[in-house]
Image (cartoon, helix red, strand yellow):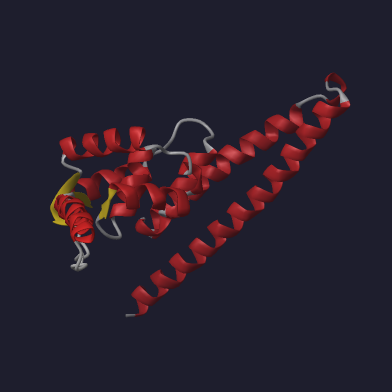
């Protein structure tokens, strides 16, 4: 799942590790807790597989330290210049997606998933714009089937075997699933309307 998120973000532009971590949190809330300890191994795996490549790193700019006019001040300024020079030599790797990475990303995005995974669906939906209309509809219809199955199972649960707190929880989950199902149905209708309009334009051209 993390590799899918990384490739999706790199489709927009090359990013270095810190920027990737920040965007995983800011753009994809499900990855708010990702650590550098999990991000960098994922980047190394993707680099080894050829899915991403490292752009030529650019040194950070340092700010010039002006002369002070005193011995103590000059000594302090000299130390600052050493630190600034050292900092300017540090570089950041900028990662970019490759053609192989593009193909891998499309395969991950369009793949049929085992089980009802809300986080994975949310991630795929965030990058749904990169799929063609038919693939987007297929993704949404798979999600609809998963949710319909979840709703059917919840409705089959005998109320008599539940205490009032568990029953309240089941009822809450049921109503939430019903609302989510309506939301997905609306997404599917919108996608189908757009696809029909596109096909009609193509037929009349």
138 above or below 37?
below
Figure label count: 0
Quadrant housing residue 195: bottom left
Residue depicted at x 18% and y 55%: 75
Rendering coords of residue 40 (x, y %): 28, 37
Q: Nearer the viewer, residue 120 or 13?
A: 13
Q: Nearer the viewer, residue 71 or 12?
A: 71
Residue depicted at x 18% and y 59%: 71
Q: Nearer the viewer, residue 64 or 203?
A: 64
Q: Residue furthest left?
A: 56
Q: Residue furthest top?
A: 161
Which corner quadrant holds the C terminus? Answer: bottom left
Residue depicted at x 28% and y 56%: 11
Quadrant housing residue 164: top right
Rendering coords of residue 28 (x, y %): 46, 50
Residue depicted at x 72% and y 31%: 154
Rendering coords of residue 17 (x, y %): 29, 47
Q: Residue furthest bottom?
A: 205
35 above or below 59?
above
With 179 as the anchor, is 113 left or right in this view? left
- Is residue 97 visible to the viewer in this orientation of the structure? no
Rendering coords of residue 31 (x, y %): 46, 42
Q: Nearer the viewer, residue 35 or 159?
A: 35
Which corner quadrant holds the N terminus? Answer: top left
- Is residue 26 visible to the viewer in this orientation of the structure? yes
Q: Residue furthest front?
A: 71
With 191 as the anchor, is 45 left or right in this view? left
């Amino acid at each position: 799942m993390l590799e899918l998120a990384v490739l999706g973000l790199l489709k927009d532009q090359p990013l270095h590790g810190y920027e990737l971590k920040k965007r995983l949190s800011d753009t994809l809330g499900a990855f708010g807790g990702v650590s550098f300890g999990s991000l960098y191994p994922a980047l190394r795996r993707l680099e080894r597989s050829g899915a991403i490549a490292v752009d030529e790193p650019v040194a950070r700019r340092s700010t010039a330290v002006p002369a002070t006019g005193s011995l103590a001040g000059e000594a302090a300024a000299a130390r600052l210049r050493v630190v600034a020079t050292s900092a300017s030599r540090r570089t950041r790797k900028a990662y970019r997606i490759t053609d192989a990475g593009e193909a891998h990303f499309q395969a991950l995005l369009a793949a049929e998933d085992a089980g009802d995974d809300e986080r994975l669906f949310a991630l795929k939906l965030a990058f749904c714009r990169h799929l063609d209309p038919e693939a987007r509809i297929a993704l949404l219809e798979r999600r609809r089937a998963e949710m319909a199955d979840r709703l059917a199972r919840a409705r089959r649960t005998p109320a008599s075997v539940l205490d009032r707190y568990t029953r309240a929880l089941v009822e809450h989950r049921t109503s939430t699933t019903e609302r989510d199902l309506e939301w997905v149905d609306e997404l599917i209708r919108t996608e189908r309307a757009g696809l029909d309009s596109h096909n009609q334009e193509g037929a009349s051209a």
